[in-house]
Amino acid sequence: MRQTAYAAARVGNRLDTELATQLRIYLRADFENADSWSALRRALRNKGFSLKVEQGRLRLVDSLSRVDICSTGFLGFPLAQLEREFGASLESNLWNSWVIG
């Protein structure tokens, strides 16, 4: 698996507007169609991304380089919304075992 093109957008550099828009479009269906954390994780992994929790936020990470790209909230899918839809909170033990990929 190759590093995604978005890995260049490290937290310090931030995504530019065009790249952020492309990323939202690229991942939108994955977030909207997932019916569970495992389904979302699988869809993102197939595109070269993982999730991690950091400082109370769910972050999108390049799976190969482990570069932190942005929060899922920045993409329009805040953690609180995903927790309501999928039924597991940030404090859940599930985060430590299978959501983060």
Image: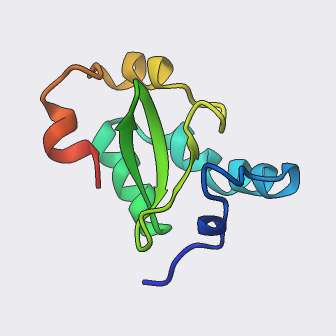
Q: Is residue 2 above or below residue 53?
A: below
> Which residue is at the front of the view, 69 or 29?
69
> Which residue is at the front of the view, 81 or 8?
8
Q: Position of residue 70 (x, y in %)?
A: 59, 45
Q: How many marks?
A: 0
Left or right of 19, for residue 63: left
Q: Position of residue 51 (x, y in %)?
A: 39, 48
Q: Position of residue 101 (x, y in %)?
A: 29, 56
Left or right of 13, for residue 96: left
Left or right of 96, for residue 41: right
Residue in the image at 64% along x and 65% along y: 6
Give the quadrant of the N terminus: bottom left
> Which residue is at the front of the view, 51 or 15?
15
Which of the colour schemes (rainbow, by chain, secondary structure, one colour) is used? rainbow
Residue in the image at 13% along x and 44% along y: 97
Residue extending furthest toward the front = 12
> Which residue is at the front of the view, 72 or 26?
72
Q: Is residue 20 above or below residue 77?
A: below
Residue extending furthest toward the right = 18
Q: Quadrant of residue 45?
A: bottom left
Q: Position of residue 12 (x, y in %)?
A: 65, 50
Residue in the image at 86% along x and 49% along y: 17
Q: Quadrant of residue 4?
A: bottom right
Residue in the image at 47% along x and 68% along y: 48
